Image (tube, rainbow, N blue to C red):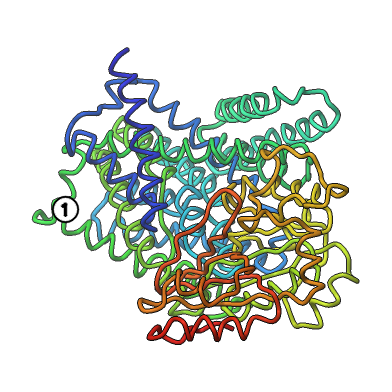
């Protein structure tokens, strides 16, 4: 009991700790989680033994966790994304699977020296990439929409496909070992039928959820528990039909539910994202901590087997994956730079390790000794691909020119003279900015200024698919309606971050004041908490935005002397492009290299000149 509690506590601390370190350093989170598991397990400090603590429960725990992760990944797939990447996704999910399976099996047999049955089975598993590694990498880096969409769809769709390939290979060789005259026709049709039945079960479950949730058949407080229990039930039921068919069922259920546009599912998005983070962290720590020295004995490069495995890993990176992508996307509309990028990025994750561990035992049971090698080999593949792709994705994307917006963007909700002026100033600082408004007429002024705009309701679910929110790490809601601004901030707080959604404060005009709880509002802009009517009044008086560059010789205090006394500091733009706003509750610490954006009265030139003259030997400020 105490040992199990210790393992659970360590899994939480190490998993979430690794995620936090990754957030602070920018390193791939998966690499840190694997390292943490290795260090805590028998390979490292030997303070954690998941298999001893959980025994036979470890395998079903990991299996259900993988099922929930695949379901959550399926919920992120929208058919509208396929408008630009559908052809490539279809090719990778069909031709790519066949080519990848054949190439992986050939490399496993001729390079790693695996027996043919083991090589064929492992080649089937290798077609998976996995959302647990691909999506975090895409989240941490900035890749253009089409290649990112292809990688995401491939990761989620190919996971159950790879599992089924492994099942087909295992069932065929099992039947051959019992009856040498067995053929593929005795194995493949039942597998296809089982996959179809599992998909139908998943689709039926999605239909039931989509019908019951909006009609109030399930109370709000039970929606998340009912959804989770349904996913687990669908997974277990489908696995009763055929091994690993449950992965097909939960993936179909997630994708189907995502495209039924059930509005009541929006409220559970934060919870499902938290569940996914916890599951990914926990499963990676549990699996890597379960690895023993015996599992690694095959990987010693000083031995012939270990040397051949090193060559196999290199072939997997530089031959198998490129051949798979280049053949599957041949004569397609995907540009060559995107093909080369996709040919490099293929990190493996949880599903590879979980399925390999399962079939290693089964292969040993039917007389294939090489089956034990799959455990260590699968971890080697995961570590090598994650390290190779995780640390190079930014550089390769930049070299192949598929890098998206690298500087953090600003999304402004509401087209007003004040927001248009702010957006123009942000553009001069090379900050990506877009103004969103549901009124075409109000956007007219922004369009005349040449500013990027989006016409639509920001709270409409369709906006999530028509407007790419990935480049925007900060949101400012500044419409004329303060209550609407608060609603927008509250809606996007979970996605962008509570500390990255801002709105104008409550107006000083008592007739316009809204008695709104602070917990429902975004952070109030300006230390003074200017409201909508306040900035509109000053905008009408000719107030403007000014930018002031700080240096070692010209610090924040000098900037305050140069600017007029009535100026109000709005934000600081770091050299990296990160935005830090002055609010009613906190102020950033400006440092050399930062640029301060202030909101000032129009006639400030003479005051600046007098301040600069008083500064004496101070460097001439760069204020415009």
Task: Find residue 394 and report its horizontal and vertical position in percent.
Answer: 42, 69
Q: Is residue 477 left or right of residue 611?
A: right
Q: In the shown orientation, is residue 429 left or right of residue 617?
A: right
Image coordinates of residue 549 in percent, x first then y, are 48, 78
How crowded is the residue under tag 1: few (<14 C-alpha within 10 Å), some, or many (20+)? some
Q: Position of residue 178 (x, y in %)?
A: 38, 32
Image quadrant for the C terminus? bottom right
Residue 599 in percent (x, y) is at: 65, 70
42 and 136: which one is in front?
136
- Which residue, given by chain and number where applicable, does mark 1 sit on? 305
Q: Residue at x 80, y 65 (%)?
A: 536
Q: Quadrant of residue 360?
A: top left
Quarter of the image that includes the N terminus: top left
Identify the residue at image location x=57%, y=41%: 273
Residue drawn at point x = 36 percent, y = 56 percent? 25
Q: Is residue 418 above or below residue 451?
A: above
**Tally of numbered tags:** 1
Q: Residue furthest top?
A: 1
Q: Quadrant of residue 258?
A: top right
Q: Secondary structure at mark 1?
A: helix
Question: Residue lying furthest right in this view?
Answer: 441
Whether residue 164 sits left or right of residue 87 in the image: it is left
Question: Foreground: 464 or 313?
Answer: 464
Location of residue 130 with respect to 605 vertically, above or below: above
What residue do we see at 30% from left, 46% from top?
379
Between 326 and 447, which is closer to the camera in this rendering?
447
């Amino acid at each position: 009991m105490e040992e199990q509690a210790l393992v659970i506590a360590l899994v939480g601390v190490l998993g979430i700790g690794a995620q936090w370190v990754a957030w602070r350093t920018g390193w791939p989170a998966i690499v840190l989680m694997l390292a943490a598991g290795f260090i805590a397990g028998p390979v490292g400090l030997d303070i954690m033994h998941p298999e001893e603590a959980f025994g036979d429960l470890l395998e079903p725990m990991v299996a259900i966790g993988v099922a929930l992760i695949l379901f959550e990944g399926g919920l992120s797939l929208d058919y509208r994304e396929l408008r630009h990447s559908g052809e490539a996704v279809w090719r990778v999910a069909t031709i790519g699977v066949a080519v990848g399976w054949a190439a992986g099996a050939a490399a496993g047999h001729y390079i790693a020296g695996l027996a043919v049955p083991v090589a064929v089975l492992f080649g089937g598993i290798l077609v998976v990439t996995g959302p647990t590694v691909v999506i975090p990498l895409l989240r941490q880096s900035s890749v253009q929409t089409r290649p990112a969409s292809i990688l995401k769809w491939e990761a989620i769709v190919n996971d159950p496909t790879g599992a089924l390939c492994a099942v087909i290979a295992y069932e065929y060789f099992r039947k051959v070992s019992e009856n040498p005259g067995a053929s593929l026709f005795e194995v493949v049709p039942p597998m296809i039928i089982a996959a179809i039945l599992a998909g139908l079960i998943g689709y039926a479950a999605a239909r039931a959820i989509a019908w019951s949730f909006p009609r109030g058949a399930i109370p709000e407080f039970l929606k998340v528990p009912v959804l989770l229990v349904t996913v687990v039930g669908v997974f277990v039921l489908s696995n009763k039909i055929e091994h690993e068919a449950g992965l097909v069922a939960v993936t179909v259920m997630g994708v189907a539910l995502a495209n039924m546009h059930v509005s009541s599912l929006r409220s559970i998005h934060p919870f499902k994202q938290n569940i996914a983070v916890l599951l990914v962290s926990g499963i990676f720590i549990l699996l890597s901590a379960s690895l023993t020295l015996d599992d690694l004995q095959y990987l010693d490069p000083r031995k012939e087997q270990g040397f051949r495995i090193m060559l196999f890993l290199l072939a997997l990176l530089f031959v198998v994956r490129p051949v798979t992508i280049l053949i599957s996307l041949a004569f397609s509309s995907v540009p060559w730079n995107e093909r080369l990028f996709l040919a490099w990025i293929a990190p493996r994750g949880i599903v590879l390790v979980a399925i390999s561990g399962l079939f290693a035992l089964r292969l040993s049971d039917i007389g294939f000794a090489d089956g034990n090698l799959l455990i260590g080999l699968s971890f080697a593949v995961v570590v090598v691909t994650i390290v190779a792709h995780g640390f190079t994705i930014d550089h390769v994307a930049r070299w192949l020119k598929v890098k998206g917006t690298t500087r953090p963007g600003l999304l402004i909700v509401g087209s007003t003279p004040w927001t248009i002026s702010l957006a123009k100033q942000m553009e001069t600082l090379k900050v990506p900015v877009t103004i969103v408004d549901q009124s075409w007429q109000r956007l007219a002024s922004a369009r005349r200024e040449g500013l990027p705009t989006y016409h639509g309701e920001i709270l409409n679910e369709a906006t999530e698919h028509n407007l790419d929110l990935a480049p925007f790490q900060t949101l400012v809601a500044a419409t004329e309606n303060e209550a609407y601004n608060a609603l927008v901030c509250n809606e996007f707080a979970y996605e962008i971050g509570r500390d990255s959604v801002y709105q104008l404060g409550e107006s000083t005009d008592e007739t316009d004041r809204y008695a709104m709880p602070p917990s429902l509002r975004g952070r109030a802009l300006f230390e003074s908490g200017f409201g909508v009517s306040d900035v509109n009044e000053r905008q009408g008086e000719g107030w403007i935005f000014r930018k002031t560059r700080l240096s070692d010789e010209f610090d924040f205090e000098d900037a305050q002397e140069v600017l007029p006394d009535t100026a109000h500091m709005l934000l600081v733009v770091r050299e990296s492009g990160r935005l830090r706003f002055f609010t009613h509750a906190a102020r950033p610490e400006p440092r050399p290299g930062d640029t301060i954006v202030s909101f000032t009265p129009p006639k400030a030139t003479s005051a600046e000149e007098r301040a600069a003259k008083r500064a004496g030997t101070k460097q001439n400020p760069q204020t415009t």
